Structure formats: structure tokens, C-alpha cells
Amino acid sequence: MPLTFAPPSNDKAELETGSAFTPRFDEKGLVTAVVTDAHDGALLMVAHMNAEALALTIETGIAHYYSRSRNRLWKKGESSGNVQTVREIRTDCDQDAVWLKVSVAGHDATCHTGRRSCFYRTVGIEGGKAAVSIDDDHRNFDPADIYGQG
Amino acid sequence: MPLTFAPPSNDKAELETGSAFTPRFDEKGLVTAVVTDAHDGALLMVAHMNAEALALTIETGIAHYYSRSRNRLWKKGESSGNVQTVREIRTDCDQDAVWLKVSVAGHDATCHTGRRSCFYRTVGIEGGKAAVSIDDDHRNFDPADIYGQG
């Protein structure tokens, strides 16, 4: 029987200190997932999980998400081979976010652009405007090779 | 004049490699903010920002969020003194999330429970059910002292 989740308690103390994991899915049925590298703590990506993705992740130890752009369950690395083995799952005080510490297989790349992390840019102000600057441009794979030429 | 953000491009390449920071606010006008400690990289919290909070954060260097429970701008630490000075802001490939590396003042605590991080619990399966286990129960402050007895 697949893992299911009980509805969250209305009692804040129960949510914060009880022993049940009762994720607070939003109105779309999603929680936020923050993904870091279990080896060095680098932030790799932020994604979303529905109950099915979360249950599969806990049960299999392989990270599954819900793709909001494709509206479907998404086993990370299914195309690229950059599968994530989950070393630890944590949740926050109000149980609406999870933190996955993972080991990345394949090219050790998490971003679809081929970079190790999706967070390859810094944010600042340039000439009075909000600007980004790429400070990690190393590609661990060529997206055209993996995903085709679109 | 407060910092404003241009609407995101429909061109994926522009969004991923252009020089403009054009955050992709969701239908509620929010982006996800992941907050880590600039000193040791620990994940402290996950929150949300509207355009006002994001602009204030970039302009002042002090972290501001949008509180979904209180429906208002939220200067982190306004009650507790645990103000966050922002050392770096990053964004991800599709610009719908930001990563803040911060230094925490006050009690060096980010969670309203008094703990350093909101992610004080691990997630697993106990007796066939989804369960959480507290593995950081140290309180840097007593919430009753800071927020009152509710």
C-alpha cells in the first residue's frame, strides 16, 4: 500500500512538535522542496512535490517531483540520468516545505542547462535596474545532447 | 524611486542567460525564497517574497518577506531582533526562486520556535506511517519571552 499522509492538525503545537509527518500541501496540492548536495551542502534546485511524489521519494529513496510546467509526476534524471539518491529528508516548523539532501548520479548536474546547480546567477542592481550575473557557466553536460535540439 | 521588475520574457534563452532580473512571480505575486546562513551554508528557512519585499531586500540589504499567514510585508526579525543581513542573492534558471545567503543578528535563531533553523526535524517512516523526528531541540531564545504567551 502506498504511503499516505494524514491531514495536518489545526493545533500548531502538534504540527511543530508532534511525531506525525502531515505535510501542508497548498491549494494545488504541492509542497516546496529544497534540494542540496549531501556531500557539500550546495543548493542545487527548488521544486515542488505533490503527495504522490513525496510518498515515492520517501519509499524509494529516489527523488520524485511534480512538474508544474508538464503537469505530471517527474522522476528527476529520467531523461538526463542525473538521478538523485536521497540521503536525508527534513521538514520545517509548519510542514509546508521539505529539504532533501541528495547524491546526484550521471553528470553530477541538476540544472537542465547542464550546470551543477540551477542557482548559477547572482542578483544585484546595474544602472538602476535589477540585474543578474552568471558566475557559474561550467556545463557538466550539453543539453542538446541530452534533450535534443528542441 | 523604488526598484521595479520588468515582466519576464517569454523567450526561455533570455530568461536563462539574459542580464535582466525578471522574477517570475506566481499568480499570487510571490516567488520562493530559500535562506541559508552565509557563514556555514545551513538551511535556515523557506519563505515567500512579493515584488515589494524583493525590492526592499535588494535595496536595503536586509531580508524582507511576504507573510502569507498575516497577508503583509514582513521584515524578518522585527519582533525577535533576528534580523537577516543579506550577503548574496542568487536566482535559479527560470527565475521563480531566489536564494539568500544571510547573517543572522540577535539570537542567531531563524525559527519562531527559537531554534536556529526551521528545519529541525527529519522525515521517515515509523510503523508504516510518515513520521518526523526532532534532532535539533536547542532553543536560542524562548518564544514566550519574545512573542508573549499568545
Image (spheres, coloured by chain):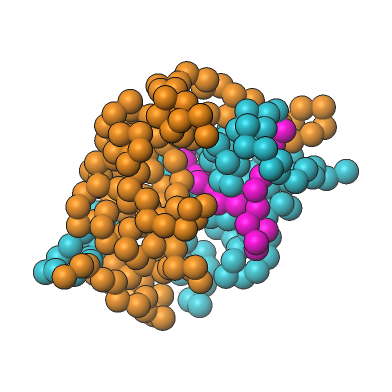
Chain colours: A cyan, B orange
- Residue B67 visible to the viewer: yes
For the point 35% across and 38% down, which residue is it?
A: B79
Q: Quick check: B146 left or right of B55? A: right
Q: Residue furthest left?
A: A127
Comparing A82 with A46, the one in front is A46
For the point 82% across and 32% down, which residue is it?
A: B128
Question: Which of the 4 image quadrants contains residue A76?
Answer: bottom right
Q: Quick check: A74 left or right of B110? A: right
Question: Can you say which quadrant of the picture contains the N terminus of chain B?
Answer: bottom left
User: Does B63 sit above or below residue B83?
Assistant: below
User: Does A103 sit above or below residue B64?
Assistant: above
Q: Quick check: B61 left or right of A15? A: left
Q: Which residues are magenta?
A: A20-40
Comparing A80 with A62, the one in front is A62
Percent position of residue B87, x then y: 23, 43
Percent position of residue A127, x then y: 11, 69
For the point 35% across and 34% down, which residue is it?
A: B80
Question: Which of the 4 image quadrants contains residue B148?
Answer: top left
Q: Residue furthest bottom?
A: B10
Type of secondary structure dominating the magenta stretch: loop
Percent position of residue B17, x then y: 31, 69
Q: Residue furthest right?
A: A1
Comparing A15 with A116, the one in front is A15
Percent position of residue A115, x then y: 39, 55
For the point 51% across and 71% down, which residue is it?
A: B27
User: Does B87 sit above or below residue A51?
Assistant: above
